[in-house]
């Protein structure tokens, strides 16, 4: 068994990598990682430098761990800026750090990618080998800490067993309870929430917009340019940082059109007004980017939530994640869900302090979960 380090995803054959790609999660697909790299959205001076680890035995690829050396905390969605500030105040360097994550993507998915034919004893062995190699990389790079973001619950033991502290965060997810139509979904909600959603959709109907679902061969290069324009419009309004560039959108619209849904709104003259971009795989849907060139009442809710629910019901999808944060999603049928990250701080004193903070944060989050439960939008 041998661990190798890759400088980028194109250091491995696409079909070989395909055997490690997780179901229900498109963001470790070869094409997505290649789009990030080719476009320059990661690498160079982006703050994300790939250091992918792969485990091989007799030339066969068994597993992988996508690591990045980070020189800042942008694009992670699990916030540790205060930790970095505390390090700086004590004259210590928090950066570089090592992160296992999908850049700019707050979606939960496997971090330890293992070939499905690997038996359980070997699976345990290769995961251990990857995490040991990751520690060696951290030592070589002189990092302050190692982090794994948006880790699925069944992988937490692997990280906790190596001294990582498990941190809890919160998102709002929609789950399909066997609905056949959007009306079935509305019927499962309490009267107040059902009326609210119906009112919001009705008010938008008065705007005279046409909403289209585009996926597969219906997606054209012009749609990539349009979505990039929408993406920038959202960031301009929120003083955001444009992590992704035009080349990224061009690439994924060309190579991942079977895993993309573009929800596009046109006005009465046929001019594009707004769009929302989703990624999908198997029975999971992920809302990622949206933007609008005009202010229209309830347009964000319609394109980012209701159209996504419509699509998920039509396709029989089980899960719809609409992105990070946003308690306003609760009233629209998205329930609070814990998400997890794992953190290992190398400095013993800071490690203890941050560990204590993480435990107190869990208590506050547990209280919030109880509060949200009292506002469950579904019928009791």
Image: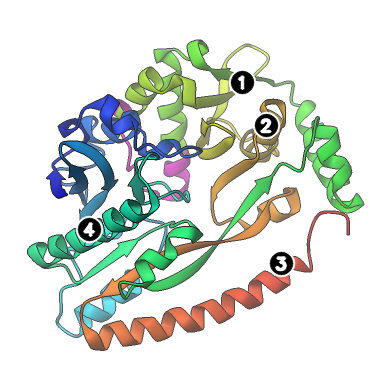
**Residue in front for this viewpoint, 46 or 292:** 46
The magenta segment:
234-247
> Which mark, residue 307?
2
Q: Which residue is mark 3?
A: 372
Tag in front: 4 or 1: 4
Which quarter of the rendered picture does the C terminus lie within? bottom right
**Residue in front for this viewpoint, 203 or 369:** 369
Query: Residue 135: percent from the left, percent from the top?
Result: 19, 65
**Residue in front for this viewpoint, 18 or 57:** 57
Query: Of callouts 4 and 2, which one flags the residue occurring earlier in the amino acid sequence?
Result: 4
**Label 3 environment density (alpha carbons within 10 Å; few <14, some 14–19, many ≥20):** some
Judged left or right of residue 162, residue 340 is: right
Q: Mark 2 near mark 1, Cβ–Cβ under 8 Å?
A: yes
Q: Mark 3 near mark 1, Cβ–Cβ under 8 Å?
A: no
Query: Of callouts 3 and 2, which one flags the residue occurring earlier in the amino acid sequence?
Result: 2
Residue at the image position 37 percent from the left and 47 percent from the top = 119
Query: Of callouts 3 and 4, which one flags the residue occurring earlier in the amino acid sequence?
Result: 4
Tell me how far mark 4 sits from mark 2, CA to CA: 43 Å
């Amino acid at each position: 068994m041998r661990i190798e380090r890759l400088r980028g995803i194109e250091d491995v054959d696409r079909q070989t990598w395909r055997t490690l790609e997780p179901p229900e999660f498109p963001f470790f697909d070869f094409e997505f990682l290649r789009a990030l790299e080719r476009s320059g959205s990661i690498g160079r001076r982006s703050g994300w430098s790939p250091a992918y680890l792969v485990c091989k035995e007799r030339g066969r690829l068994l597993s992988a761990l996508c690591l990045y050396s980070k020189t800042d905390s942008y694009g992670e969605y699990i916030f540790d800026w205060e930790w970095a500030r505390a390090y700086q105040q004590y004259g210590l360097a928090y950066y570089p750090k090592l992160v296992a994550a999908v850049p700019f993507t707050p979606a939960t998915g496997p971090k330890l990618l293992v070939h499905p034919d690997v038996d359980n004893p070997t699976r345990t062995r290769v995961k251990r080998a990857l995490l040991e190699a990751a520690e060696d990389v951290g030592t070589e790079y002189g990092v302050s800490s190692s982090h794994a973001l948006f880790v699925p619950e069944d992988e937490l033991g692997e990280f906790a067993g190596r001294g990582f502290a498990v941190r809890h965060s919160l998102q709002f997810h929609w789950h399909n309870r066997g609905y056949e139509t959007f009306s079935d979904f509305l019927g499962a909600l309490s009267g107040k929430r059902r009326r609210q959603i119906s009112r919001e959709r009705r008010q938008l109907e008065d705007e005279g917009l046409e909403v289209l679902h585009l996926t597969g061969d219906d997606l054209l290069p012009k749609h990539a340019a349009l979505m990039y324009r929408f993406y920038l419009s959202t960031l301009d309004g929120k003083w955001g940082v444009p992590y992704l560039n035009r080349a990224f959108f061009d690439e994924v619209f060309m190579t991942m059109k079977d895993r993309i849904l573009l929800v596009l709104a046109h006005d009465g003259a046929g001019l594009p007004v707004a769009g929302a971009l989703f990624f999908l795989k198997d029975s999971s849907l992920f809302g990622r980017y949206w933007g609008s060139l005009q202010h229209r009442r309830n347009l964000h809710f319609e394109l980012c939530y209701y159209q996504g629910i419509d699509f998920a019901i039509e396709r029989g999808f089980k899960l719809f994640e609409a992105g990070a944060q946003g308690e306003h999603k609760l009233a629209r049928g998205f329930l609070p869900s814990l998400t997890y990250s794992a953190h290992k701080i190398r400095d013993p004193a800071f490690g203890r302090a941050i560990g204590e903070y993480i435990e107190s944060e869990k208590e506050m989050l547990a209280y919030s979960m109880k509060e949200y439960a009292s506002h469950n939008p579904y019928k009791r």
